[in-house]
Amino acid sequence: MGKATDMASRQRIIKLKQEGKTLFEISQELLIPYPTVRNLWQQYRVNPEKGLTTNYANCGKPPKTKQDLIFRAALWLKHLHSQWGTPRIHLALCERYGRENVEHIRTLQRWYRDANLIKPRQQMAEPIIGDSKAVHNIWQVDAKERLTLLDGQQACYLTIVDEKSGGALEAPVFPLRPNQPSSH
């Protein structure tokens, strides 16, 4: 949360703007963020008497609400019952405090994540195959299906290539059997 702009800076913004400077130039000169300068100028234009006054009533922590009770109850239930999922805790809170007073399940999950009460799911790591270090460590096998040969016969064949050397190891050809169901 940003800090309040003091009264001297607020008055300086108005004075510089009335002298003809742009809001951007004022923000650069006073080292105040441009949106702050713009908002203060707009407030002043709408209501010159109240436009510069600070609003300290808006500062600080808001008073405790029923929301804080739900927050504390949700964290406490998760702490006591770490194996319970968020929908189960949500159901317990709804039964106790009423559905209209309880936040959505995703909000509860965010609260748990922020309080480090849940661990992110483990991602399955893809096996690292890497480069082949020696000949015949890794073979590449590629299948070609339902090829039509020059004589009109259909066939399939495999190519087997060694990854390290790049040498073709074998390329067997298989004729299609009659009455064999098509895989397509």
Image (spheres, rainbow, N blue to C red):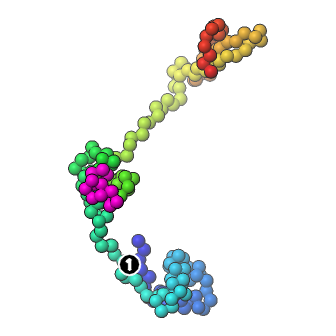
Q: Is residue 99 left or right of residue 44?
A: left
Please, which residue is most extreme toward the right here?
Answer: 150
State the residue position of label 1: 58
Q: Is residue 114 left or right of residue 149?
A: left
What secondary structure do most residues of the magenta stretch adopt?
A: helix
**Residue 65 shows in this picture:** yes
The residue lying toward the viewer, choosing from 162 and 55, is 55
- In magenta, the rendered stretch is 90-102
Q: Residue at x 74, y 12 (%)?
A: 149
Q: Is residue 97 magenta?
A: yes
Q: Is residue 22 magenta?
A: no
**Residue 118 shows in this picture:** no
- Looking at the figure, which quarter contains the N terminus? bottom left
Residue type, label 1: Asn
Above or below, comparing residue 56 to residue 157 in the picture: below
Give the percent coordinates (x, y) of residue 68. 29, 64
Please, which residue is most extreme toward the top here?
Answer: 178
Q: Residue at x 48, y 87 (%)?
A: 51
The residue lying toward the viewer, choosing from 34 and 104, is 104
Give the percent coordinates (x, y) of residue 32. 50, 79
Q: Residue at x 46, y 89 (%)?
A: 50
- Looking at the figure, which quarter contains the C terminus? top right
Within-10-Å neighbours for mark 1: few <14, some 14–19, many 20+: few
Above or below, comparing residue 117 to residue 150 in the picture: below
Count the labels in the image.
Answer: 1
Which secondary structure, mark 1?
A: helix
Q: Is residue 82 left or right of residue 158?
A: left
Give the percent coordinates (x, y) of residue 94. 30, 54
Give the percent coordinates (x, y) of residue 125. 44, 36
Above or below, comparing residue 142 to residue 130 in the picture: above
